[in-house]
Image: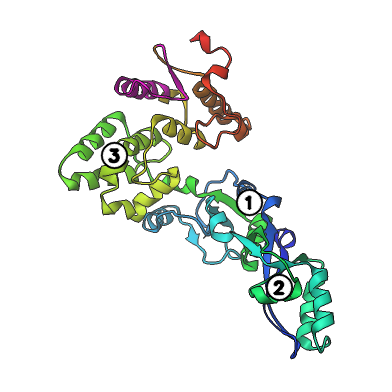
Amino acid sequence: MLQEIFKNIIEIHNMDNDDSVIEFEIKKCLPSDAVNKQELIKLIQPVKYTISKGDKIYFLQGCDVPRFKLSTLKDDIGFSISKTVDNANVVVYSEKFVDKMFKSDYVSNYVTKYEITKYVRDKFKNNESESVQKFLSVLHDENTMDIVSFWNWSKFREVKPNAYHNSQRVWEADIEDLKTIDTIKANKIIVHQDDLLSRINIVNMTEDMFLEACKMFRSKDHNNHVLAMELMANCDYDKSALYLLELFRLFSRDKIYNRREKSHVNFKSLCNYFGVRPGDYYDLDDIINILTAKRVLTPDKLDTLIKLAKEDFAETVDNNSKYFKVLDIVPNNNLLNNIANIERIMEGHNIDDKEFYYSDDRNINKKDDDDIDNDDDF
Protein backbone atom coordinates (compact mmCIF):
# COMPACT_ATOMS: atom_id res chain seq x y z
CA MET A 1 0.00 0.00 0.00
CA LEU A 2 1.20 3.49 -0.84
CA GLN A 3 0.52 4.69 2.68
CA GLU A 4 3.19 2.24 3.84
CA ILE A 5 5.65 2.94 1.02
CA PHE A 6 5.60 6.71 1.53
CA LYS A 7 7.37 7.62 4.77
CA ASN A 8 7.20 10.58 7.15
CA ILE A 9 9.65 13.43 6.74
CA ILE A 10 9.77 16.03 9.50
CA GLU A 11 10.13 19.67 8.50
CA ILE A 12 10.94 21.94 11.45
CA HIS A 13 9.41 25.41 11.22
CA ASN A 14 10.66 26.79 14.52
CA MET A 15 12.59 25.75 17.64
CA ASP A 16 12.63 27.62 20.96
CA ASN A 17 15.30 26.17 23.20
CA ASP A 18 14.34 28.19 26.27
CA ASP A 19 10.63 27.33 26.16
CA SER A 20 11.34 23.81 24.87
CA VAL A 21 8.96 24.18 21.96
CA ILE A 22 9.37 22.59 18.54
CA GLU A 23 6.97 23.52 15.74
CA PHE A 24 7.08 21.02 12.91
CA GLU A 25 5.16 19.57 9.98
CA ILE A 26 4.95 15.96 8.83
CA LYS A 27 5.12 15.28 5.10
CA LYS A 28 4.58 12.00 3.26
CA CYS A 29 7.52 11.48 0.91
CA LEU A 30 9.42 8.91 -1.11
CA PRO A 31 12.96 9.44 -2.44
CA SER A 32 12.89 10.10 -6.19
CA ASP A 33 15.68 7.60 -6.79
CA ALA A 34 13.39 4.88 -5.42
CA VAL A 35 10.74 5.31 -8.13
CA ASN A 36 10.45 7.34 -11.35
CA LYS A 37 7.41 8.98 -12.90
CA GLN A 38 6.67 6.10 -15.26
CA GLU A 39 6.62 3.70 -12.33
CA LEU A 40 4.18 5.96 -10.49
CA ILE A 41 1.92 5.95 -13.55
CA LYS A 42 1.94 2.15 -13.54
CA LEU A 43 0.59 2.15 -9.97
CA ILE A 44 -2.86 2.24 -11.59
CA GLN A 45 -3.59 -0.40 -14.20
CA PRO A 46 -6.82 -0.30 -16.27
CA VAL A 47 -8.94 -3.32 -17.14
CA LYS A 48 -11.13 -4.16 -20.11
CA TYR A 49 -14.57 -3.02 -19.02
CA THR A 50 -17.56 -1.47 -20.77
CA ILE A 51 -19.26 1.16 -18.63
CA SER A 52 -22.98 0.36 -18.49
CA LYS A 53 -26.26 1.32 -16.89
CA GLY A 54 -26.13 1.55 -13.11
CA ASP A 55 -22.39 2.15 -12.83
CA LYS A 56 -21.24 4.88 -10.46
CA ILE A 57 -18.14 6.60 -11.83
CA TYR A 58 -15.49 8.58 -9.97
CA PHE A 59 -13.10 10.72 -12.03
CA LEU A 60 -9.60 10.75 -10.61
CA GLN A 61 -7.65 14.00 -10.59
CA GLY A 62 -6.01 14.67 -13.97
CA CYS A 63 -8.93 13.55 -16.16
CA ASP A 64 -9.92 15.99 -18.89
CA VAL A 65 -13.06 14.45 -20.37
CA PRO A 66 -15.30 17.35 -21.54
CA ARG A 67 -18.11 17.49 -18.99
CA PHE A 68 -20.73 18.83 -21.42
CA LYS A 69 -20.13 15.84 -23.71
CA LEU A 70 -20.13 13.49 -20.74
CA SER A 71 -23.62 14.56 -19.71
CA THR A 72 -25.04 13.32 -23.04
CA LEU A 73 -23.24 10.00 -22.78
CA LYS A 74 -24.37 9.65 -19.16
CA ASP A 75 -28.01 10.01 -20.19
CA ASP A 76 -27.61 7.61 -23.12
CA ILE A 77 -25.96 4.85 -21.08
CA GLY A 78 -27.55 5.43 -17.69
CA PHE A 79 -24.53 5.69 -15.39
CA SER A 80 -24.06 8.28 -12.65
CA ILE A 81 -21.08 10.33 -11.47
CA SER A 82 -19.89 10.06 -7.89
CA LYS A 83 -18.09 12.88 -6.10
CA THR A 84 -16.34 10.44 -3.76
CA VAL A 85 -14.29 7.38 -4.56
CA ASP A 86 -15.93 5.35 -1.77
CA ASN A 87 -19.37 5.56 -3.39
CA ALA A 88 -18.14 4.59 -6.87
CA ASN A 89 -17.64 1.16 -8.40
CA VAL A 90 -15.73 2.46 -11.45
CA VAL A 91 -12.78 4.87 -11.47
CA VAL A 92 -11.81 6.72 -14.65
CA TYR A 93 -8.22 7.99 -14.80
CA SER A 94 -5.53 9.37 -17.07
CA GLU A 95 -1.75 9.33 -16.68
CA LYS A 96 -1.92 12.96 -15.57
CA PHE A 97 -3.02 11.86 -12.11
CA VAL A 98 0.69 11.69 -11.23
CA ASP A 99 1.14 15.42 -11.90
CA LYS A 100 -1.95 16.22 -9.81
CA MET A 101 -1.39 13.90 -6.87
CA PHE A 102 2.40 13.70 -6.56
CA LYS A 103 4.74 16.66 -6.25
CA SER A 104 8.39 16.41 -7.21
CA ASP A 105 10.27 18.52 -4.68
CA TYR A 106 13.52 18.92 -2.76
CA VAL A 107 14.05 18.37 0.96
CA SER A 108 16.73 20.89 1.89
CA ASN A 109 18.87 21.79 4.91
CA TYR A 110 18.39 18.47 6.61
CA VAL A 111 20.08 16.61 9.48
CA THR A 112 19.83 13.02 10.65
CA LYS A 113 17.66 11.67 13.45
CA TYR A 114 20.75 11.20 15.59
CA GLU A 115 21.95 14.79 15.06
CA ILE A 116 18.62 16.41 15.96
CA THR A 117 18.07 14.08 18.93
CA LYS A 118 21.50 14.91 20.37
CA TYR A 119 20.90 18.65 19.86
CA VAL A 120 17.51 18.58 21.62
CA ARG A 121 18.86 16.61 24.58
CA ASP A 122 21.91 18.84 24.95
CA LYS A 123 20.39 22.30 24.31
CA PHE A 124 16.76 22.22 25.47
CA LYS A 125 16.07 23.18 29.07
CA ASN A 126 13.11 20.84 29.41
CA ASN A 127 13.29 17.65 27.40
CA GLU A 128 10.10 16.41 29.05
CA SER A 129 7.87 19.17 27.65
CA GLU A 130 4.79 18.05 25.74
CA SER A 131 6.10 19.67 22.56
CA VAL A 132 9.46 17.92 22.72
CA GLN A 133 7.95 14.56 23.59
CA LYS A 134 5.54 14.81 20.66
CA PHE A 135 8.42 15.64 18.34
CA LEU A 136 10.61 12.79 19.62
CA SER A 137 7.71 10.35 19.33
CA VAL A 138 7.25 11.13 15.63
CA LEU A 139 11.00 11.31 15.06
CA HIS A 140 11.64 7.79 16.31
CA ASP A 141 8.60 6.24 14.65
CA GLU A 142 9.67 3.45 12.29
CA ASN A 143 7.74 5.15 9.47
CA THR A 144 9.82 8.33 9.75
CA MET A 145 12.77 8.72 7.38
CA ASP A 146 16.22 9.61 8.64
CA ILE A 147 15.81 13.15 7.33
CA VAL A 148 14.80 16.22 9.36
CA SER A 149 14.70 19.44 7.37
CA PHE A 150 14.63 23.09 8.45
CA TRP A 151 12.86 26.15 7.14
CA ASN A 152 15.29 28.34 9.03
CA TRP A 153 18.90 28.33 7.82
CA SER A 154 20.31 29.64 11.12
CA LYS A 155 18.59 26.87 13.11
CA PHE A 156 19.94 24.33 10.68
CA ARG A 157 23.46 25.67 11.30
CA GLU A 158 22.91 25.55 15.06
CA VAL A 159 22.22 21.86 14.86
CA LYS A 160 24.89 21.20 12.26
CA PRO A 161 27.66 23.85 12.58
CA ASN A 162 29.77 24.56 9.50
CA ALA A 163 27.29 22.67 7.35
CA TYR A 164 26.70 23.50 3.73
CA HIS A 165 23.37 23.53 1.96
CA ASN A 166 22.22 19.99 1.21
CA SER A 167 19.14 18.65 -0.54
CA GLN A 168 17.50 15.42 -1.63
CA ARG A 169 14.85 15.07 -4.30
CA VAL A 170 11.62 13.38 -3.25
CA TRP A 171 8.07 12.66 -4.33
CA GLU A 172 5.64 14.31 -1.92
CA ALA A 173 1.97 13.33 -1.61
CA ASP A 174 -1.00 14.21 0.53
CA ILE A 175 -2.05 11.39 2.84
CA GLU A 176 -5.65 11.58 1.59
CA ASP A 177 -4.48 11.15 -2.02
CA LEU A 178 -2.47 8.08 -0.98
CA LYS A 179 -5.57 6.65 0.71
CA THR A 180 -7.59 7.31 -2.46
CA ILE A 181 -5.13 5.42 -4.66
CA ASP A 182 -4.95 2.53 -2.18
CA THR A 183 -8.77 2.34 -2.19
CA ILE A 184 -8.86 2.36 -6.00
CA LYS A 185 -6.26 -0.39 -6.30
CA ALA A 186 -7.99 -2.53 -3.68
CA ASN A 187 -11.59 -2.74 -4.84
CA LYS A 188 -12.47 -0.54 -7.83
CA ILE A 189 -12.85 -1.19 -11.54
CA ILE A 190 -10.25 1.02 -13.23
CA VAL A 191 -10.95 2.40 -16.72
CA HIS A 192 -8.76 4.71 -18.79
CA GLN A 193 -10.44 7.93 -19.90
CA ASP A 194 -9.59 7.09 -23.52
CA ASP A 195 -12.28 4.38 -23.38
CA LEU A 196 -14.87 7.05 -22.58
CA LEU A 197 -13.52 9.50 -25.13
CA SER A 198 -13.80 6.89 -27.87
CA ARG A 199 -17.51 6.58 -27.11
CA ILE A 200 -18.06 10.34 -26.95
CA ASN A 201 -16.37 11.28 -30.21
CA ILE A 202 -18.14 9.42 -33.00
CA VAL A 203 -17.07 11.16 -36.24
CA ASN A 204 -14.50 9.17 -38.20
CA MET A 205 -12.50 11.60 -40.35
CA THR A 206 -12.18 10.41 -43.95
CA GLU A 207 -9.72 11.64 -46.56
CA ASP A 208 -12.44 13.85 -48.07
CA MET A 209 -13.18 15.38 -44.67
CA PHE A 210 -9.46 15.93 -44.14
CA LEU A 211 -9.13 17.75 -47.46
CA GLU A 212 -12.19 19.84 -46.65
CA ALA A 213 -10.68 20.78 -43.28
CA CYS A 214 -7.48 21.82 -45.08
CA LYS A 215 -9.52 24.12 -47.32
CA MET A 216 -11.18 25.62 -44.24
CA PHE A 217 -7.84 26.33 -42.58
CA ARG A 218 -6.43 27.87 -45.78
CA SER A 219 -9.44 30.12 -46.08
CA LYS A 220 -9.10 33.80 -45.15
CA ASP A 221 -12.34 33.56 -43.22
CA HIS A 222 -11.51 33.00 -39.54
CA ASN A 223 -14.92 31.41 -38.99
CA ASN A 224 -13.82 28.58 -41.25
CA HIS A 225 -10.78 28.03 -39.03
CA VAL A 226 -13.07 27.66 -36.04
CA LEU A 227 -15.34 25.23 -37.91
CA ALA A 228 -12.32 23.10 -38.84
CA MET A 229 -11.20 23.02 -35.20
CA GLU A 230 -14.72 22.00 -34.09
CA LEU A 231 -14.67 19.20 -36.67
CA MET A 232 -11.34 17.98 -35.33
CA ALA A 233 -12.53 18.06 -31.71
CA ASN A 234 -15.63 16.00 -32.51
CA CYS A 235 -13.81 13.18 -34.28
CA ASP A 236 -13.10 9.73 -32.91
CA TYR A 237 -9.53 10.36 -31.75
CA ASP A 238 -8.14 6.89 -32.44
CA LYS A 239 -9.88 6.19 -35.75
CA SER A 240 -9.09 9.70 -37.06
CA ALA A 241 -5.64 9.97 -35.47
CA LEU A 242 -3.52 10.21 -38.62
CA TYR A 243 -5.60 12.94 -40.26
CA LEU A 244 -6.00 14.87 -36.99
CA LEU A 245 -2.25 14.87 -36.38
CA GLU A 246 -1.54 15.86 -39.98
CA LEU A 247 -3.86 18.87 -39.51
CA PHE A 248 -1.84 19.80 -36.43
CA ARG A 249 1.36 19.44 -38.42
CA LEU A 250 0.09 21.71 -41.19
CA PHE A 251 -1.76 24.35 -39.20
CA SER A 252 -0.71 24.26 -35.55
CA ARG A 253 1.83 27.08 -35.74
CA ASP A 254 -0.42 29.71 -37.26
CA LYS A 255 -4.08 29.02 -37.97
CA ILE A 256 -4.76 26.99 -34.80
CA TYR A 257 -2.40 28.91 -32.52
CA ASN A 258 -3.96 32.26 -33.48
CA ARG A 259 -7.50 31.20 -32.58
CA ARG A 260 -8.73 31.70 -29.02
CA GLU A 261 -10.88 28.59 -29.52
CA LYS A 262 -7.72 26.55 -29.01
CA SER A 263 -8.40 27.01 -25.26
CA HIS A 264 -11.95 25.67 -25.49
CA VAL A 265 -12.37 22.62 -23.27
CA ASN A 266 -13.37 20.43 -26.22
CA PHE A 267 -10.30 21.28 -28.30
CA LYS A 268 -8.00 21.13 -25.27
CA SER A 269 -9.21 17.61 -24.65
CA LEU A 270 -8.09 16.67 -28.18
CA CYS A 271 -4.68 18.29 -27.62
CA ASN A 272 -4.24 16.59 -24.27
CA TYR A 273 -5.13 13.20 -25.70
CA PHE A 274 -2.30 13.33 -28.25
CA GLY A 275 0.06 15.41 -26.10
CA VAL A 276 0.30 18.21 -28.67
CA ARG A 277 0.30 22.00 -28.19
CA PRO A 278 -0.95 24.66 -30.59
CA GLY A 279 2.02 26.66 -31.80
CA ASP A 280 4.54 23.82 -31.64
CA TYR A 281 6.27 22.37 -34.70
CA TYR A 282 5.59 18.75 -35.67
CA ASP A 283 7.10 16.70 -38.46
CA LEU A 284 6.08 13.34 -39.90
CA ASP A 285 8.31 11.45 -37.49
CA ASP A 286 6.48 13.13 -34.60
CA ILE A 287 3.17 11.91 -36.01
CA ILE A 288 4.49 8.35 -36.26
CA ASN A 289 5.79 8.55 -32.70
CA ILE A 290 2.36 9.57 -31.42
CA LEU A 291 0.55 6.94 -33.49
CA THR A 292 2.94 4.35 -32.08
CA ALA A 293 2.47 5.50 -28.49
CA LYS A 294 -1.31 5.42 -28.90
CA ARG A 295 -1.10 1.97 -30.54
CA VAL A 296 -3.00 3.10 -33.63
CA LEU A 297 -0.16 2.79 -36.15
CA THR A 298 -1.97 0.09 -38.15
CA PRO A 299 -1.16 -1.22 -41.68
CA ASP A 300 -4.02 0.69 -43.29
CA LYS A 301 -2.21 3.95 -42.49
CA LEU A 302 0.97 3.02 -44.32
CA ASP A 303 -0.12 4.19 -47.80
CA THR A 304 -1.15 7.57 -46.44
CA LEU A 305 2.11 7.93 -44.49
CA ILE A 306 4.13 7.12 -47.61
CA LYS A 307 2.14 9.67 -49.59
CA LEU A 308 2.83 12.33 -46.96
CA ALA A 309 6.50 11.35 -46.85
CA LYS A 310 6.80 11.75 -50.62
CA GLU A 311 5.35 15.24 -50.37
CA ASP A 312 7.82 16.04 -47.57
CA PHE A 313 10.85 14.78 -49.45
CA ALA A 314 9.75 16.62 -52.56
CA GLU A 315 9.77 19.87 -50.58
CA THR A 316 12.84 19.24 -48.43
CA VAL A 317 15.78 17.37 -49.91
CA ASP A 318 17.68 17.15 -46.60
CA ASN A 319 14.77 15.53 -44.73
CA ASN A 320 16.23 13.39 -41.92
CA SER A 321 13.39 11.02 -41.20
CA LYS A 322 14.10 8.06 -38.94
CA TYR A 323 11.25 6.12 -40.53
CA PHE A 324 11.76 6.59 -44.28
CA LYS A 325 14.77 6.37 -46.59
CA VAL A 326 15.09 7.79 -50.07
CA LEU A 327 15.47 5.15 -52.74
CA ASP A 328 11.94 5.29 -53.64
CA ILE A 329 9.92 6.33 -50.61
CA VAL A 330 9.57 3.10 -48.67
CA PRO A 331 9.13 2.40 -44.95
CA ASN A 332 12.21 1.13 -43.12
CA ASN A 333 12.33 -1.53 -40.41
CA ASN A 334 11.59 0.97 -37.63
CA LEU A 335 8.13 1.71 -39.01
CA LEU A 336 7.34 -1.86 -40.12
CA ASN A 337 8.39 -3.17 -36.69
CA ASN A 338 6.04 -0.76 -34.91
CA ILE A 339 3.11 -1.75 -37.14
CA ALA A 340 3.85 -5.46 -36.62
CA ASN A 341 4.00 -5.05 -32.85
CA ILE A 342 0.67 -3.22 -32.75
CA GLU A 343 -0.90 -5.97 -34.86
CA ARG A 344 0.39 -8.47 -32.27
CA ILE A 345 -1.18 -6.41 -29.46
CA MET A 346 -4.51 -6.47 -31.31
CA GLU A 347 -4.18 -10.27 -31.45
CA GLY A 348 -3.86 -10.37 -27.68
CA HIS A 349 -0.09 -10.49 -27.18
CA ASN A 350 1.64 -8.40 -24.50
CA ILE A 351 4.30 -6.18 -26.07
CA ASP A 352 6.54 -4.06 -23.84
CA ASP A 353 7.00 -0.42 -24.85
CA LYS A 354 10.74 -1.08 -25.20
CA GLU A 355 9.94 -3.21 -28.26
CA PHE A 356 8.75 -0.09 -30.10
CA TYR A 357 10.96 2.40 -31.89
CA TYR A 358 10.54 6.13 -31.18
CA SER A 359 12.54 8.70 -33.11
CA ASP A 360 12.42 11.10 -30.13
CA ASP A 361 13.87 10.81 -26.61
CA ARG A 362 11.31 8.20 -25.52
CA ASN A 363 13.20 5.59 -27.52
CA ILE A 364 15.41 3.64 -25.12
CA ASN A 365 17.23 1.53 -27.70
CA LYS A 366 17.51 4.13 -30.45
CA LYS A 367 19.31 3.02 -33.59
CA ASP A 368 20.25 4.86 -36.70
CA ASP A 369 19.08 3.50 -40.02
CA ASP A 370 22.61 2.29 -40.75
CA ASP A 371 22.49 0.03 -37.66
CA ILE A 372 19.32 -1.77 -38.68
CA ASP A 373 19.75 -5.19 -40.25
CA ASN A 374 18.40 -5.93 -43.72
CA ASP A 375 17.88 -2.28 -44.71
CA ASP A 376 19.53 -3.09 -48.03
CA ASP A 377 16.60 -5.41 -48.80
CA PHE A 378 14.42 -2.42 -49.73
Tag 2 secondary structure? helix
Front residue (pair 254, 124): 124
Q: Does the magenta-highlighted stretch encompass residue 326? A: yes
Residue 200 visible in the current orientation: no
| Quadrant occupied by the N terminus | bottom right
When the figure is inspected, residue 251 is found, relative to residue 15, above or below; the finding is above
* Residue 37 shown left or right of residue 219 in the figure: right
Q: Position of residue 145 (x, y in %)?
A: 76, 64
Mark 3–mark 1 contact, CB under 8 Å? Answer: no
Q: Extreme top residue here? A: 377
Q: Position of residue 175 (x, y in %)?
A: 65, 67
| Mark 1 → mark 2, Cα distance in angstroms | 35 Å
Indicate which disc residue 251 carries. Answer: 3
Pointer 1 local density, CA inside 10 Å: few below 14, some 14–19, many at least 20? some
Mark 3–mark 2 contact, CB under 8 Å? Answer: no
* Residue 327 shown left or right of residue 227 in the figure: right
Front residue (pair 204, 288): 288
Q: Amino acid at mark 3?
A: Phe
Q: Would you name the residue on which mark 2 appears?
A: 157
Tag 1 secondary structure? helix
Quarter location, residue 347: top right
When the figure is inspected, residue 242 is found, relative to residue 275, above or below; the finding is above
Q: Would you name the residue on which mark 1 appears?
A: 40
Pointer 2 local density, CA inside 10 Å: few below 14, some 14–19, many at least 20? some
Q: Extreme left residue here? A: 220
Q: Amino acid at mark 2?
A: Arg
